[in-house]
Amino acid sequence: MPTLETERLILRSFHQEDIDRMAHLFANPDFMRFSLGVFTECKQTIAFIEKVMSWDRAGIPSQFAVVPRGKDTVIGYCGFFYHPEHGIEDIEIGYRLHPDYWNRGLITEAARVVRDYGFRDCNLSRVISLIHPENIPSRRVAEKNEMNVEKEITFRGFPTLMYAITRQEWLARRGAG
Ligand SMILES: CC(C)(COP(=O)(O)OP(=O)(O)OC[C@H]1O[C@@H](n2cnc3c(N)ncnc32)[C@H](O)[C@@H]1OP(=O)(O)O)[C@@H](O)C(=O)NCCC(=O)NCCS
């Protein structure tokens, strides 16, 4: 995958050297809000890194490590997830950020450039975000990413809002559709 840049962030592919830092993030209950829980074992982080690296190798849109410009510390992730095992064929944009960096607009910046990359370079027809109704910050990010609630589903046993934006909507908003 290419490296994506925003005003304040670099979004790059994950590599093996990120395991220790990601294990630290995945062990943080705030970073893991609205998930199935913190990772208690390193093998869970290794499985995440190997999964996203394998998508990269296969040329499939994957997750990006989120790094502040001018630093070399990963502060979160933002990118694509797949849920065919849950009967969901759409590609999700998912994200998590270290709490020290919340509410500065950083994941909005990241999610927008990821969305644009998906539509412009990967030719995706539609992307979704799956969000617990009580996760207000994440819902705001989806709204600022020009997504709308399409329906409520049960995902991994929890009530979940499916936010979506189609390629046509994305093009139309840019005056090209
Ligand atoms: C969701 C998450 C990635 C957002 O990252 P972020 O960089 O802080 O997001 P942004 O700053 O771009 O936007 C957050 C928005 O939520 C708003 N917000 C945050 N807390 C809020 C609250 N309690 N009530 C109302 N709005 C709130 C912020 O004001 C901001 O909206 P605004 O720009 O309209 O003011 C981050 O909170 C996080 O990592 N949470 C834990 C993991 C998670 O929930 N991931 C998503 C799973 S679906």
Image (tube, rainbow, N blue to C red):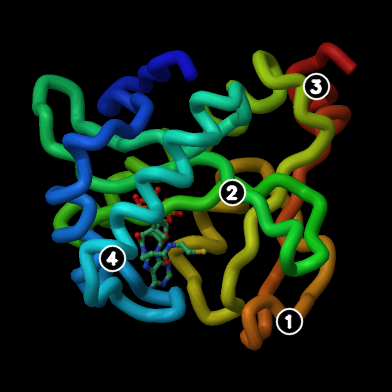
Q: Residues within 10 Å of mark 4 (few under 14, many from 20)?
A: many
The mark lying in front, picked from 3 and 2, is 2
Q: Is mark 2 on a helix, strand or loop?
A: strand
Residue 154: numbered disc: 1
Count neighbours of disc 1 (C-alpha within 10 A) and say few if under 14, some if 14 to 19, many if 20 or more: few
Would you call the spot at circle 3 few (<14 residues within 10 Å), some (14-19), or many (20 or more)?
A: few
Name the residue tied to disc 2.
81
Q: Quadrant of residue 174?
A: top right
**Which residue in the structure is indicated by mark 3?**
171
The reply to whether the residue tagged 4 has its Cβ within 8 angstroms of ligand 1 is: yes
State which quarter of the image contains the C terminus.
top right
Depth check: 148 or 22 in front?
22
User: Taking 81 as reference, is 165 left or right?
Assistant: right
SS class, disc 1: strand
- Counting residues from the N terminus, which is met first, the one under dot 3 or under dot 2? 2
Residue 170 percent across, percent down from the top left: 76, 29
User: Above or below — where is 68 with respect to 160?
Assistant: above
Q: Which amino acid does label 4 sit on?
A: Phe
For the residue labelled by badge 4, is the local secondary structure a helix, a strand or a loop? Answer: loop
Image location (x, y in percent) of residue 124: 76, 29
Query: Contact (CB < 8 A) between labels 4 and 3?
Result: no
Q: Which residue is found at the position 23% from the left and 71% from the top?
A: 41
Q: What's the distance in space between the residues labelled 4 and 1, CA to CA?
A: 22 Å
Which is closer to the viewer, label 4 or label 3?
4
Residue 156 on image: x %, y %? 63, 79
Which quarter of the figure has residue 24?
bottom left
The answer for how far apart the CA atoms under marks 1 and 2 are is 17 Å
Local SS, label 3:
helix
In this rendering, the answer to whether 171 lies above or below 105 is above
Q: Looking at mark 2, is its residue's CB closer than 8 Å to ligand 1?
A: no
On residue 31, the disc is: 4
* Disc 1 residue type (three-letter): Thr
